[in-house]
Image: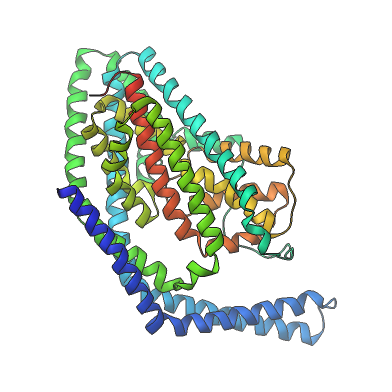
Amino acid sequence: MRRSKLTLYIFIALVVGVITGYLYNTLVINEINTKMAAAEAQIKTIDARLVTMTDTTVAGYKELNIQRAEQVTIRKANDAAREDKLVGFNILSDIFLRLIKMIVAPLVFTTLVVGVAKVGDIKAVGRIGGKTLLWFLSATLVSLLLGMVLVNFFEPGKAMHLPLPDSHISTGVQKAALSLRDFIGHVFPKSFIESMANNEILQIVVFSLFFGVATAAIGEKGEVVIKAMDAIAHVILKITGYVMKAAPLAVFGAITAIIAKQGLGILSTYAIFISEFYFSLLILWLVIILAGYVVLRRRAFTLVNNIKDAMLVAFSTSTSEAAYPRVLIELERFGCNNKIVSFVLPLGYSFNLDGSMMYMTFASLFLAQSYNIHLSFEQQLSMLLILMLTSKGIAGVPRASLVVIAGTISMFNIPEAGLALLIGIDPLLDMGRSATNVLGNAMATAVVSKWEKEID
């Protein structure tokens, strides 16, 4: 009963947030947005004139640069003013996300150590790990391929007809470096404390695996550590229960801020792209549930029903991390053995972000279509494989996918300036893919539990 009430409160918060955001946008933010749009239009006009000028020493060139700097200042001032007006709503979601992030790192560490130590020998850890990674890699490939097939079928970018931009225009989105050294640095921690402080889930997972195996290896002495870790994990899960009570407020704040900032117009401007992406996510949901049904039978639907609160939280806050503690609790209630949940779920948050995977191919190829850049089937496949590698260990936080896309599209001569098309609507898209990530990880954990015969 309590769970269904939380779902109801979160849904009410969503609806009230949209209405409040629309009213706030109309009455308070609209004037600021108008000034920003005017400044943006002036900057584009000046940029177009600057490109045509060959002699940079003439007075006219300097005058245009001065005018451009003035318009940039106006835009920045209004942007700051807009953020000030929205700070009250943003604080609501920020507090909730900070509290969740406070829980995630110690929860991953304690539960994974207990999980690995209870599994016992390295052979068992390797067996469960092998099955888990097999599912993760299969799910990742299916998500990327499905995104590639559907974006080629729908061709949402064809209607954009964008001219290729000047190479010097920056997007402000930092690229994800595609180097083996950086990837290794992202996986192996140099300091466990630093990994905990930065919520580097993949590094925490690596340390926890070593710690869990070592705890199991020392036998009787390790029992004390396992009991202590188990107790700490239960304390943190109790804290999670308190924090989750604030979820409806966080949802209200996050949704209100997005709609107030962008207006309901953001929904109609990119309606085709947004609707086609969400339809693609729906197909991915069906694929994930069908794959789960093959192993779990009808219980796959029960699991989806159980985790709907967690998915709503991930949807509303645009981060799958926010749902982690809740998913952990629901999987244990579902009947999955604690040691499997503690082992598989943290790995999933680094290796199995199905929604983000689909979005990466969908968005990258959408940008190519928008600029009328034709990519052959071979090029699309190589992009898919690069995304598969660069995305591993990506944080389940807002805008993380954009960073990976920024680092990948440049390899295929797709203008990075195109990311500006996605930045505005990214919060709306992030909501859907975060909820999908939660579904994918919960289903993976339940399936591995069933394979290991560790499910009630």
Residue 174 horizontal side relative to residue 61, left or right:
left
**Relative image position of residue 59 (x, y in whole percent):** 78, 87
Depth check: give the residue in front, 180 or 49: 49
Query: Looking at the image, how many numbered discs can be counted on the residues?
Result: 0
The picture quadrant where one finds residue 113 is: top left
**Relative image position of residue 338 (x, y in whole percent):** 25, 27
Depth check: give the residue in front, 117 or 317: 317
**Rendered position, 76 above or below 334:** below
**Rendered position, 60 above or below 112:** below
- Residue furthest to the left in view is 1
The residue depicted at 44 percent of the width and 34 percent of the height is 189
Q: Quadrant of the C terminus?
A: top left
Residue 413 horizontal side relative to residue 70, left or right:
right
The picture quadrant where one finds residue 144 is: top right
Residue 61 horizontal side relative to residue 108, left or right:
right
**Relative image position of residue 90 (x, y in whole percent):** 34, 66
The residue depicted at 68 percent of the width and 55 percent of the height is 369
Depth check: give the residue in front, 289 or 320: 289
**Rendered position, 334 above or below 166:** above
The residue depicted at 63 percent of the width and 80 percent of the height is 41
Name the colouring of the figure: rainbow
Res. 406 in view: no
- Residue furthest to the right in view is 54
**Relative image position of residue 16 (x, y in whole percent):** 29, 69
Res. 452 in view: yes
Residue 205 horizontal side relative to residue 2, left or right:
right
- Residue furthest to the front in view is 298
The residue depicted at 21 percent of the width and 46 percent of the height is 240
